[in-house]
Amino acid sequence: MGRRLPSLSALRAFEAAGRHLSFSRAATELFVTQSAISRQIRSLEDYLGTLMFRRFNRRLELTEAGATYLATMKDCFDRLEDATVRIRSKPSREQLNISVLPTFAIRWLVPRLPAFTEAHPDIDVRMAMSSEPVDFNRDEVDVAIRVGRANRATDVSGTPDSATRVRLDRLFPDVLVPVCSATHQRESPPLRSPKDLTDHVLLHTTTRRNAWEEWSEAMGVAKVTSVRELWFGHFFMTHQAACEGRGIAVLPLVFVADDLASGRLVEAIERPIASGEWYYMLCRENQARGRNLALFREWIDEESRSAKSEADAIGAAQPPHKKSRN
């Protein structure tokens, strides 16, 4: 047996007219004509067998039946609206919000991420690129990837021992390697030792402005100087400049491993060094074992193994000349 209810159009017209005590304002709200509102109200009154409004020349008043019906109708509509908002705001897929360093995203994570999303199509990965410290109490972030020393508080709001209970998982060591294009290597003065860099254009990155200094210090030589320097905002910009033959750059091995393998870039001097820092993953300790995070952590740990192996293969131990930078 069907429900014994008036038409929804009549109910919407009555509820709007009752709230405004005006047919014209109800018509404006519902994007219909005033006469359409009037017809719907008459239809409702005929169905119920009683008047809902007392009509005067320039105003309306609810009858006792109308006031009672409006109160019930408003409550029903409010509950229906709340339920609608909750359903529409609830994601149809589970979300995983990632905050990641720009060049790490472009050069390492994005090319690999399709494997994760294909394996877990129900997880909607949303990525934001940032070099700023992550604050899990402020930012809408489930997991972040940063580079630094595990005991530094510059990459995360609080240390792993603070009240925020941030979990830190190491991915792979940060290995720096001087690279240039094969064309630059052929057409520029020979490079036999770090001192020969003086005759070359050096490419710098503002987000890691001490990279050349770290590398030269690890080599046990004075600060590298050159005839000319070019500065870029992020590693991916410096990487592109190196590929175009504009000079020599010190870049993380993890960003250039494929280029070195393909010959797009070559090692300007075969002296990769470990900076003493690591790429690491951060998340809230109390969410680390949640399904989405656990799957992502397991996947990225597996993907990181090749980078760890590459670092081991070149003997990426802490150089004896490298000083701690806290």
Image (cartoon, helix red, strand yellow):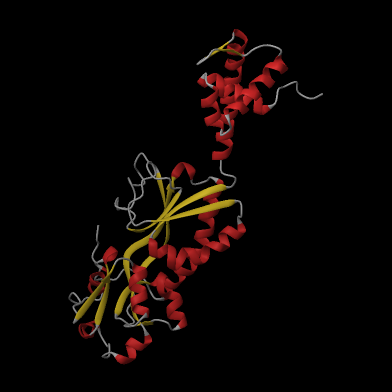
Expressed as whole percent of the image width and height from the top left, the position of residue 208 reads 28, 65
Residue farthest to the right? Answer: 1
Tell me which residue sits at (59%, 9%) in the image. 63
Residue farthest to the top? Answer: 64
Instruction: Give the answer, above or below, for where 185 lies relative to 36.
Output: below
Locate residue 257 relative to residue 27 in the image: left or right. left
Front-most of residues 306 and 129: 129
From where the camera sits, is residue 169 visible?
no
Locate residue 218 relative to residue 126 in the image: left or right. left
Q: Quadrant of the N terminus?
A: top right
Locate residue 5 relative to residue 116 in the image: left or right. right
Front-most of residues 53 and 214: 53
Instruction: Give the answer, above or below, for where 207 lies relative to 164.
Output: below
Instruction: Give the answer, above or below, for where 127 lies relative to 12.
Output: below
Expressed as whole percent of the image width and height from the top left, the position of residue 206 reads 26, 65
Tell me which residue sits at (58%, 22%) in the image. 15
Total numbered labels: 0
Expressed as whole percent of the image width and height from the top left, the position of residue 26 reads 54, 26
Q: Quadrant of the C terminus?
A: bottom left
Front-most of residues 160 and 319: 160
Instruction: Give the answer, above or below, for where 112 lies relative to 67.
Output: below
Expressed as whole percent of the image width and height from the top left, the position of residue 218 reads 26, 72
From where the camera sits, is residue 279 visible?
yes
Residue farthest to the front? Answer: 57
Tell me which residue sits at (55%, 29%) in the image. 27
